[in-house]
Every structure is written in structure tokens, then in C-alpha cells.
Amino acid sequence: MNKQHRSSIDIVESILEHLSREGKSIKTHMLYASNLNTIVFEKYLLMLIRKGFILKIGDASEYTLSNKGAILLERIRNLKRMLLEDDKGDRLVDRKLNTVIERNLGGMVKVHGYQGYKGASGAHYYVYTIKHSSGSYIVDAVLSSKPDILVEACIRMLVISTDIGVPAILVVKGSSEKHVVMDLLGKIDASKIMVLSI
């Protein structure tokens, strides 16, 4: 992709993606991965560090992705998926998702796509929705194995589902990821959450 035509989101994604893939990296490798000039790269790096998306490892000149950065990267990927939902590659993802849902619920997914909802709280949501013979469901797919991202997605879907009154399906990568989510759901106790106002 030509660097003149990339958005700030694309640039942030390229830096975070590099750190996610490598685990840790020095500044020079991040610069090459981002395909930016040094001055522009430094501005993005400082902003990502200041906001807590990237962490510097000790006194070394190495950097790593923070949990907050991993969650941001997952959100950027989901946002791009939403924007590209009519593209050929995304239809393949939709078919795979529908196959998993049909195999577990039985029957066929009749309609699928992103839909807007207004919750009882007044909040607005735009989430992937399927219509199945057993009813409507909101759906999210998390391909990450990182517990922080799995927990964040689980909480998000739980809150949205409760607010709009539509059951949720969270599709995860494998059985160990499913265990993390199921363990969290088994421990949720609303009485442990105190809500305060200023």
C-alpha cells in the first residue's frame, strides 16, 4: 500500500501488527514495518507509548505491545471487517462463521450482516447479527488467544446483549479460548460491581 494514501488507523495498525507478530522489537524494525519516514514514525511511536498502547522494555531499546494495544489492534481489525463486509474475502469469513453457528445450533442461518440497535440505556450499537430458526443473535468472533482480548470481547457482548435484549454468540478460536470465556461467565456476580456517580 502506498504510504501517501494510508490513514492514521492504517499506520497505527501496521506498527501494532508488527509488535503483535514479533512479540518485541527494536525501533528500526518497527520503522521498516511501518513504511514511514523517521520523523513521522517517531510521532506515531511517541503517541502510542504516551497512550499506553506500546511499552518500552526496561532500559533496553526494545518495545512490546501492551494489553491495551492488543485490544486496540483487535478493534481495528473488527472495524475494517465491518467496513469491508461486502468484499469477497469477508463473505468467506461470513460463510465460515455461519457454518460454525449452524453446526452448533442446527438449522440454517437465514440472514446475516451488521445491524444497528438502540439499547434500553439509550446507547446505540452496530453489531453483526444473524437470524436463525431459533431467533436472532448478535455475534462476535475473536481469533486472538490472549485472555485480555477474550475477556474484553466477552464483557462487551454481555453488556450489549443485556442492553438490547438479544442473545449473544461469541465464537472463539479453540477449546482453551472457550475455557477462558466460560470460566469468566461462571464467575460473574453482578453484586460485586458497585456503580458510583460524581
Image: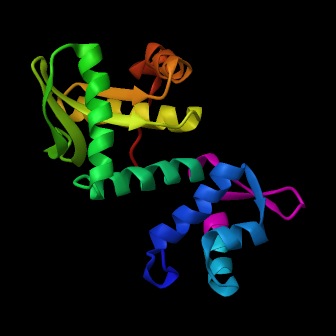
- Tell me where residue 38 sits by quadrant: bottom right
Question: Where is 11 relative to 186, above or below?
Answer: below
Is residue 51 visible to us here? no
On whether residue 4 falls in the magenta region, the answer is no
Q: Residue at x 36, y 55 (%)?
A: 79
Q: How many marks?
A: 0
On whether residue 55 falls in the magenta region, the answer is yes
Q: Residue at x 28, y 16 (%)?
A: 103
**Extreme-right residue of the structure:** 59
- Where residue 105 appears, as percent x and y from the top left, is 23, 15
Q: Residue at x 67, y 59 (%)?
A: 54
Q: Residue at x 89, y 61 (%)?
A: 60
Is residue 179 visible to us here? yes
Question: Where is 22 relative to 174, above or below?
Answer: below
- Where residue 57 appears, as percent x and y from the top left, is 82, 55
Is 126 positioned to the left or the right of 96 in the image? left
State the extent of the magenta-drawn residues as a range. Answer: 47-68
Is 127 positioned to the left or the right of 77 in the image? left
Give the colouring mode of the picture: rainbow
- Where residue 184 appears, as percent x and y from the top left, is 49, 20
Question: Where is 10 relative to 57, above or below?
Answer: below
Q: Depth check: 45 or 130 in front?
A: 130
Is 116 positioned to the left or the right of 34 in the image? left
- Where residue 25 appears, as percent x and y from the top left, is 77, 59
